Amino acid sequence: MGIYDVPPAYVIEETAQKLRGEIEEPSFAQFVKTGVSRERSPQREDWFYVRMASILYRAYKWGNIGTERLRSYYGGRKNRGLKPERHFKASGKVIRIAVQKLEKAGYLERAQPKGRKISTKGFRLLTAMSKVADKNLAEGKYVKKIRSTVDDKKKREVQETLKLQDERMHGKKPESKKQEKPKKKDAKAGDQ
């Protein structure tokens, strides 16, 4: 079972649960925002562990990681009132502390010439968590997304409403084949 064989959200969730028992959360985590583009601090209590697991997954996927690259990845659009929205980077302190804690725990190691990369211990952790996520997925422990079925129902309702409106306007159902219009002769071509 490979890491890519399971949806990343499930691997990250399982990894976050594992990291929760091993690494201590910093004291500022319950008060801080994750970037200037956010209006409030995260609502989820274990958001710091999810961010660490996501950083570990990024290190596996990208190879070498650095704080600035991760800041760009985790950033977002900021609502600036009447001005157009634009992208702002995420908080560097949060990412830096998460990377340092993962390195101290042995899941990341320094890369050459700079940055960090995933260690063998980190690779083993992600592989083990992907197996756990695959097992839980097979047992049906994860809640399936209901949104897609709601979206499908909504699409059908909109399509039926549009058909009814077309019938009312034209008195009958619109034909699927397009009728060809007679071609008009070019007036300028005929004068010459």
Image: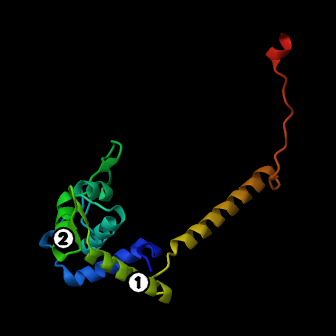
Question: From the image, which quarter does the N terminus lie in?
Answer: bottom left
Q: Earlier in the sequence, mark 2 or mark 1?
A: 2
Callouts 2 and 1 close, C-beta under 8 Å: no
Looking at this rendering, what residue extends furthest in the left direction?
A: 27
The quadrant holding residue 99 is bottom left
Q: Position of residue 4 (x, y in %)?
A: 44, 72
Which amino acid is tagged 1?
A: Lys
Q: Which mark is residue 131?
A: 1
Name the residue rendered at 47%, 84% in the picture: 137
Looking at this rendering, what residue extends furthest in the front direction?
A: 112
Q: Secondary structure at mark 1?
A: helix
Q: Nearer the viewer, residue 159 or 32?
A: 32
The residue at which mark 2 appears reads as 103
Q: Give the answer, above or below, for where 100 lies relative to 169.
A: below
What is the image's colouring? rainbow
The quadrant holding residue 91 is bottom left
Q: Which mark is residue 148?
A: none
Name the residue rendered at 33%, 68% in the picture: 60
Name the residue rendered at 85%, 30% in the picture: 183
Q: Nearer the viewer, residue 13 or 84?
A: 13
**Relative to 6, is 103 on the left or the right?**
left
Q: Position of residue 74 (x, y in %)?
A: 30, 59
Question: From the image, which quarter does the C terminus lie in?
Answer: top right
